[in-house]
């Protein structure tokens, strides 16, 4: 409440002086505080008829491993509420890591769609192919591809066909080195051999 009132004090002056060239940045290093503060800020501005753009970010979020998680929670929660106009992922270290992290957040909340979406399952007792290895090869092959496209790599035929049908293309383990190749709108096709390369070749045909 104190952060919001302090900010509103200056915004009211801007309004009185008819100065509109303002972006509101109200941050905290605590993710919960940041989210609650920005939500309150948005509500108070709306109540007072202000439409200044809001900048989102968890400030001083820490090293990339921790900072990306904190930022995704804070920024993502607000974007899903429909709040926020600009964002910044604040990471300790190389600033070149910040834009990709921000782009990932925009992708995962559905505000950016020009990218390849990847779906893969966790490893369980039913897994019969190298899910992680296949997915890493696919992601490396498609690095830099900016089209709306969804790829699924699943470890078995229990969840695989369902996820595969939701994707543009998918592959799931079928046992004994075989797999099921699934394309949207087509019946599954049994394939054998280098499953990663088979999937990559089929993706290139589709793209």
Image (tube, rainbow, N blue to C red):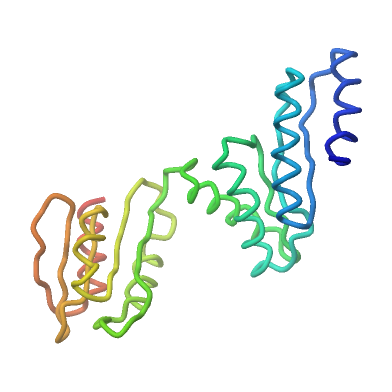
Query: Could you say which is closer to the camera, residue 191 or residue 180?
Result: 180
Q: Is residue 96 left or right of residue 184?
A: right
The quarter of the rendered structure image containing the N terminus is: top right
Image point (40%, 67%), residue name: 140
Q: Is residue 174 left or right of residue 113?
A: left
Image point (64%, 34%), residue name: 85
Image point (59%, 56%), residue name: 101
Q: Position of residue 72 (x, y in %)?
A: 60, 55
Q: Is residue 34 left or right of residue 132?
A: right
Q: Quadrant of residue 82?
A: top right
Q: Is residue 174 left or right of residue 140?
A: left
Q: Quadrant of residue 181?
A: bottom left
Image point (62%, 36%), residue name: 83
**On screen, residue 16 above or below 60:** above
* Total numbered badges shown on the rendered structure: 0
Q: Quadrant of residue 40?
A: top right
Q: Position of residue 119 (x, y in %)?
A: 35, 62
Q: Position of residue 138 (x, y in %)?
A: 34, 67
């Amino acid at each position: 409440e104190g952060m919001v009132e302090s900010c509103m004090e200056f915004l009211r002056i801007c309004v009185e002086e008819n100065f509109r060239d303002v972006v509101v940045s109200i941050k905290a290093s605590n993710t919960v505080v940041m989210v609650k503060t920005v939500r309150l800020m948005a509500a108070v501005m709306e109540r007072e008829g202000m439409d200044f753009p809001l900048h989102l970010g968890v400030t001083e979020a820490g090293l990339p491993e921790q900072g990306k998680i904190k930022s995704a929670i804070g920024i993502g929660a607000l974007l899903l509420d429909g709040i926020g106009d600009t964002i910044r992922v604040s990471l300790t270290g190389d600033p070149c890591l910040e834009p990709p992290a921000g782009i990932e957040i925009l992708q995962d909340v559905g505000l950016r769609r020009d990218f390849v979406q990847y779906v893969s399952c966790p490893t369980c007792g039913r897994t019969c192919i190298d899910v992680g290895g296949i997915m890493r090869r696919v992601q490396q092959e498609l690095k830099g591809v900016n089209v709306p496209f969804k790829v699924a790599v699943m470890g078995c035929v229990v969840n695989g066909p369902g996820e595969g049908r939701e994707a543009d293309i998918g592959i799931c383990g079928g046992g004994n080195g075989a797999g099921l190749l699934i394309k949207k709108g087509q019946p599954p096709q049994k394939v054998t051999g280098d499953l990663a390369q088979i999937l990559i070749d089929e993706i290139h045909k589709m793209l």
